[in-house]
Image (spheres, rainbow, N blue to C red):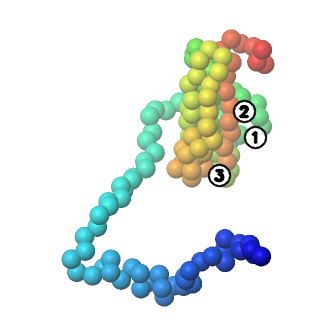
Amino acid sequence: MITRMSWCCMRTKRVTKDTRMQDQIPLFQEGNTPTKYLPIYRVMLVREGQMQSYEHQFRCSADAARMLATYLADVDREHFVVLMLDQKNHVIGIHTVSMGSLTASIVHPREVFKAAILANAATILCGHNHPSGAPRSA
């Protein structure tokens, strides 16, 4: 009769903190050089410009709509924008995540949150425009 064993019972040796440390000791002995180098990255948030605003603090969705309408007034393609706010709902930045075509804008969540995390935003507001002027997609 054949008995089945789960994959976790098939380990050959028990791994503990001491055994891991013993496995790594030869790496630090004299004469060993690293065989692989890892890249080191620096991520920066760069301000590209400024926009005049009369809104000091968002109190309702109409305030956000006015700011987005001003920011996206003269664009001919669909843009997806993130407004980054601090804890008191003051705008600390605007980031255009995607510039699409006449009818679509492709957006990935990591691109939405990247600038907000770098700017230490407490809240984000996402918005996009309809260049055709229609409030709903066809």
The residue pinned by badge 2 equals 63
In the rendered view, tell whether residue 7 sits above or below residue 29: above
The answer to which of 15 and 113 lies nearer the viewer is 15
Please state which amino acid type lies under the numbered disc 3.
Answer: Ala
Query: Hey, which quadrant is residue 84 in on the image?
Result: top right
Residue 13: numbered disc: none
Disc 2 crowd, CA 10 A, few/some/many (<14, 14-19, 20+): some
Residue for badge 1: 59
Going by the numbered disc 2, the residue's amino acid type is Asp
At 47% across and 81% down in the image, what residue appears? 20
Q: Position of residue 67 (x, y in %)?
A: 65, 29
Asked whether disc 2 touches disc 3, contact meaning CB atoms under 8 Å apart, the reply is: no
Disc 2 from disc 1: Cα separation: 7 Å
| Quadrant of the image containing the C terminus | top right
Q: Does 63 sit left or right of 108 as displayed?
A: right
The kind of secondary structure element at disc 3 is loop
> Residue 55 falls in which quadrant of the image?
top right
| Residue 69 visible | no
| Of the pair 72 and 24, the residue shown nearer to us | 24
- Residue at which label 3 appears: 122
For label 2, the SS is: helix
| Dot 3 alpha-carbon crowd within 10 angstroms: few under 14, some 14 to 19, many 20 or more | some
Q: CA distance from mark 2 to mark 3?
A: 18 Å
Question: CB atoms at circles 3 and 1 under 8 Å apart?
Answer: no
Q: Residue at x 56, y 25 (%)?
A: 99
* Image quadrant occupied by the N terminus: bottom right
In the rendered view, would you say 72 is above or below 109?
A: above
Q: Residue furthest front?
A: 1
Q: Earlier in the sequence, mark 3 or mark 1?
A: 1
Mark 1 burial class by Cα count in 10 Å: few <14, some 14-19, many 20+: few
